[in-house]
Image (tube, rainbow, N blue to C red):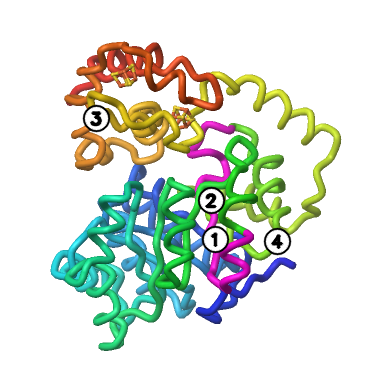
Amino acid sequence: MKQVILGKTGIEVKRLGFGGIPIQRVSEEQAIDAVLYAVEKGMDFIDTSRMYTTSETRIGKALSQTAKKPVIATKSFGRTADDIRKDVEISLRELQRDVIDIYQCHSINTVEDYRKITAKDGAYAGLVKAREEGLIRHIGITSHSLDILATALDDDLFETIMVCFSFLEPAAKEKVIPKALAKNVGILVMKPLSGGVIEAPEPALKWALGYPETLVLAGVESRDLIDQNWSIFQGNWELTESDREAIKAISLQYDKKFCRRCDYCLPCPSEIPIQFVLGARTFLKRMGPGGLKVPIFTSLWDKAENCTECGQCATRCPYGLPIPELIKANVEWRKGLDI
Ligand code: SF4
Ligand code: SF4
């Protein structure tokens, strides 16, 4: 139960993995220490991305100092075969590996992006070639959109999917997880604490681990956090009465504030990527100052400022979020940042 086989990849790992986003926001010394501490403790899966600024480099430096060989997954925003090929080569160099276990197409959230990566000269073809050449072992996809993941599963192209799954965002358990299991596709769970929104790790991790056959990735950057999560992982995952109460209270607190990334509010006539604007604060919290330079973050605001407050989106949000109001608040918050 504490191990999982990631579908057709055949990779068997512990069900709690190391999420490589937050190590960007600490010093290199602390980041390397965190990676080494985690793998020495027994964590055997590390996820990172080309997009996470220094994360791959720091993981590579840390792993060069230990005989442990955790499974490594990384990902790229490259949408064409050429672009992702360049990123595979950079990832290999930064991670100091001859081969990367799982290479993922990162953040495929729109039909347009999905079409691009699955085109003849798209990123997927680039990864198939890299796999044939022995540079990577398996190909995965990550997305905030359950519809895109469902399509990817129908198309039988990918060996793993990465999906948002927490008690604030449980929809994947109906829409995507059963399909992935039926197709024998490995399931990587991202954001078990809803990207840092949930500040109660024990109920959140127990809730996520309570759904079998998934690998849960939790971002960590310090020994304390690793100890905390590892002790939850090693303990009993059954929710206690106080866990249930915490889940109920947090769910209530965020009911009309938390964006579940379902995209039902789209399309927006001003082409605002609503879920990214609403999630921008927690994104930056996890990424640290490096996040200010990430294109997906910097490109949001010009569009967000064009919100006409027409309210069309709000009528489509199944959670009743006051979207125009939340967008306005985030635009104001962003104006106060030094970017
Ligand atoms: S209120 Fe703003 S975000 Fe919503 S649909 Fe209208 S322009 Fe787009
Ligand atoms: S604002 Fe509402 S409809 Fe839009 S992505 Fe978030 S939860 Fe879904």
Q: Earlier in the sequence, mark 3 or mark 1?
A: 1
Find out if the beta carbon at label 4 lies less than 8 Å from the nearest ligand 2 atom: no
Residue tagged by mark 4?
212
Q: Residue at x 33, y 31 (%)?
A: 267
> Which mark lies nearer to you, 3 or 1?
3
Work out whether residue 220 or residue 302 is closer to the camera in this orientation and state it: 302
Quadrant in the rendering for residue 104: bottom left
Q: Residue at x 35, y 29 (%)?
A: 274
Residue tagged by mark 3?
271
Disc 3 marks a residue whose amino acid type is Glu
Quadrant in the rendering for residue 87: bottom left
Residue tagged by mark 1?
17
Q: Spatial distance from mark 2 to mark 3, Cα to Cα?
A: 31 Å
Q: Is residue 26 visible?
A: yes
Q: Is residue 220 visible?
A: no
Mark 1: few, some, or many residues within 10 Å (few <14, many ≥20)? many
Work out whether residue 79 or residue 17 is closer to the camera in this orientation and state it: 79
Q: Quadrant of the C terminus?
A: top left
Query: Residue 204, relative to residue 130: is it above or below?
Result: above
Find out if the beta carbon at label 3 lies less than 8 Å from the nearest ligand 1 atom: no
Mark 4: few, some, or many residues within 10 Å (few <14, many ≥20)? few
Q: Residue at x 79, y 34 (%)?
A: 244
CB under 8 Å between callouts 1 and 2? yes
CB under 8 Å between callouts 4 and 1? no
Q: Spatial distance from mark 4 to mark 3, Cα to Cα?
A: 38 Å
